Protein backbone atom coordinates (compact mmCIF):
# COMPACT_ATOMS: atom_id res chain seq x y z
CA UNK A 1 0.00 0.00 0.00
CA UNK A 2 2.80 2.44 0.88
CA UNK A 3 4.65 1.56 -2.33
CA UNK A 4 1.59 2.35 -4.42
CA UNK A 5 1.15 5.72 -2.68
CA UNK A 6 4.83 6.53 -3.16
CA UNK A 7 4.58 5.65 -6.85
CA UNK A 8 1.53 7.94 -7.13
CA UNK A 9 3.39 10.83 -5.50
CA UNK A 10 6.53 10.35 -7.53
CA UNK A 11 4.61 10.22 -10.81
CA UNK A 12 5.20 13.95 -11.11
CA UNK A 13 1.70 15.38 -11.24
CA UNK A 14 1.34 15.80 -7.48
CA UNK A 15 4.79 17.33 -7.11
CA UNK A 16 4.12 19.74 -9.99
CA UNK A 17 0.83 20.74 -8.39
CA UNK A 18 2.50 21.37 -5.02
CA UNK A 19 5.21 23.50 -6.62
CA UNK A 20 2.59 25.46 -8.54
CA UNK A 21 0.61 26.15 -5.37
CA UNK A 22 3.75 27.29 -3.52
CA UNK A 23 4.67 29.67 -6.35
CA UNK A 24 1.11 30.97 -6.47
CA UNK A 25 1.07 31.70 -2.74
CA UNK A 26 4.42 33.48 -2.93
CA UNK A 27 3.28 35.55 -5.92
CA UNK A 28 0.01 36.49 -4.19
CA UNK A 29 1.91 37.64 -1.11
CA UNK A 30 4.33 39.65 -3.23
CA UNK A 31 1.58 41.38 -5.20
CA UNK A 32 -0.36 42.12 -2.00
CA UNK A 33 2.65 43.71 -0.34
CA UNK A 34 3.43 45.71 -3.49
CA UNK A 35 -0.08 47.10 -3.54
CA UNK A 36 -0.23 47.84 0.16
CA UNK A 37 3.16 49.48 0.59
CA UNK A 38 3.75 51.15 -2.79
CA UNK A 39 0.61 51.62 -4.87
CA UNK A 40 -1.85 52.43 -2.08
CA UNK A 41 0.22 55.28 -0.55
CA UNK A 42 0.87 56.81 -3.99
CA UNK A 43 -2.84 56.73 -4.83
CA UNK A 44 -3.69 58.19 -1.40
CA UNK A 45 -1.27 61.09 -1.85
CA UNK A 46 -2.50 61.73 -5.40
CA UNK A 47 -6.07 61.69 -4.13
CA UNK A 48 -5.32 64.12 -1.31
CA UNK A 49 -5.76 61.56 1.46
CA UNK A 50 -3.14 60.90 4.15
CA UNK A 51 -1.49 57.51 3.76
Image (spheres, rainbow, N blue to C red):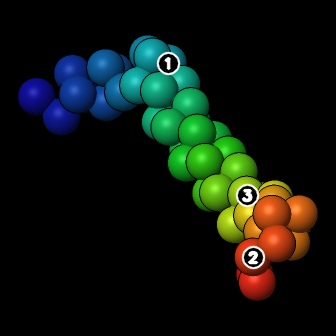
Q: Where is residue 15 drawn, in percent x and y?
A: 49, 30
User: Which quarter of the image is occupied by the C terminus?
Assistant: bottom right
In this rendering, the answer to whether 44 lies above or below 13 is below
Residue ID for mark 3:
35
User: Residue 3 sits in which quadrant?
Assistant: top left
Residue ID for mark 1:
12
Label 3 sits on a secondary structure element that is: helix
- Foreground pick, 35 / 5: 35
Q: Are marks 2 and 3 in contact (CB under 8 Å)?
A: no
Label whose residue precedes the other's in the sequence (1 or 3): 1
Q: Are marks 1 and 3 in contact (CB under 8 Å)?
A: no
In this rendering, the answer to whether 16 lies above or below 38 is above
Q: Where is residue 2 drawn, in percent x and y?
A: 18, 34
Asked if residue 32 lies left or right of residue 20, the reply is right
- Foreground pick, 20 / 43: 43
Asked if residue 33 lies left or right of residue 46, the reply is left
Alpha carbons under labels 1 and 3: distance apart:
34 Å
Residue at the spot 56% in from the left edge and 31% down from the top edge: 20
Alpha carbons under labels 2 and 1: distance apart:
50 Å
Q: Are marks 2 and 1 in contact (CB under 8 Å)?
A: no
Residue ID for mark 2:
49
In this rendering, the answer to whether 5 lies above or below 26 is above
Amino acid sequence: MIKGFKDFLMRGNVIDLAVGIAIGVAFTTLVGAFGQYLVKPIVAVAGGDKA
